[in-house]
Amino acid sequence: MTDSFGQISSHYGDAGIGDRILAALREEGVDIDALTPEILAPIDQFHTRGIVATREHAALAAPHEDMHILDVGCGVGGPARYLASTYGCRVTGVDLTAEFIAVAKMLTERCRLDHFVDFQQANGLDLPFADASFDMVWCQNVTMNVEDKAGFYSEIARMLKPSGRFTSTEMTSGTAGPPHFPLPWARVPEISFLVPQADMRAALETAGFRILEWRDTSADVVASAQRQTERVRYAKLGVGLVAGADMGDRAANSGRSLAEGRLVNVMMLAEK
């Protein structure tokens, strides 16, 4: 299992992400010293359905300004900045990939949100915080790269205050066979750790969570591929600047796998 951590970090952590983002923004005439979450949204929301899913996810989770939220698998910080700027809450983001953390800090400073949002490199299975440090834990497209789901959910539960909430959007395995690779979270099967929905629910409940809401959003993901907002995400100022030039093809494989029942996308909310 340990070897997979390096492979996962390498999958995501292409060098020069920050420089590519800033150069692309300059070329399009964007003032890189006056960035906003809205300007960055086509680039930094590189999970399934992007900013649309983040807004829906936040509406379900209902964060508020008195909360301190932990974003596990924060990437380059898009959702964390959205939560802080929209709801006024404090957000701490962690990610396994050092390059993501460096870029997240840089972009957050340029958005002038670093007084609300901070980041550090960490493994979601061994988080560097005391028990009961957070009001909410937030994840988007993280557990597909987590083999030890029982350990991960136990660590999430440890982070939360009593009655704290955990909210997540993830891919699970479908019933029609393995998905088509390469995928957004894995170019090769060796770092993709999908489980059926029932197994994910069981792991959450074993870790001490009560599931409040569970939504199958697969049809929404498939339908979104035809929308202009989704096409923008794969344009010049899009997620390819972070996730790689092949991200469009990988996302297409994800959509095809969802449509064929090889994957299921879920959004859930649970309480400790």
Image (spheres, rainbow, N blue to C red):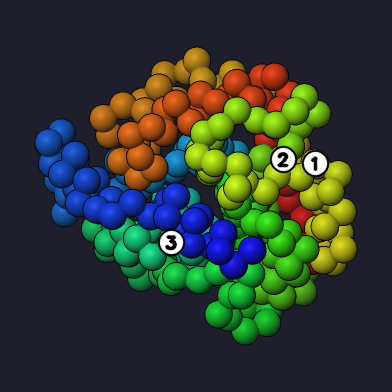
Question: Who is closer to the viewer here, 108 or 124?
Answer: 124
Judging from the image, what secondary structure is the residue with disc 1 in? Answer: loop
Label for residue 108?
Answer: none
The location of residue 216, given as percent across then percent down, is: 74, 33
Residue 100 vs 177, above or below: the answer is below
Of callouts 3 and 1, which one flags the residue occurring earlier in the amino acid sequence?
Answer: 3
Q: Position of residue 23 (x, y in %)?
A: 15, 44
Q: Secondary structure at mark 3?
A: loop
Q: Locate residue 234, reporting x and y percent.
A: 36, 28
Please identify the quadrant where the N terminus is shown. Answer: bottom right
Residue lying furthest top: 226
Is 108 located above or below residue 68 in the figure? above
- Return the mark for residue 172: 2
Q: Where residue 196 is drawn, which disc sits there?
A: 1
Q: Residue at x 70, y 44 (%)?
A: 194
Q: Quadrant of residue 57?
A: top right
Q: Residue at x 48, y 31 (%)?
A: 250
Q: What number is the disc on residue 97? A: 3
The amino acid sitting under disc 2 is Thr
Which sits in the foreground, 189 or 252? Answer: 189
Amino acid at dot 1: Pro
Q: Are marks 1 and 2 in contact (CB under 8 Å)?
A: yes
Label 3 Cα crowd, 10 Å radius (few <14 / some 14-19 / many 20+):
many
* Amino acid of disc 3: Thr
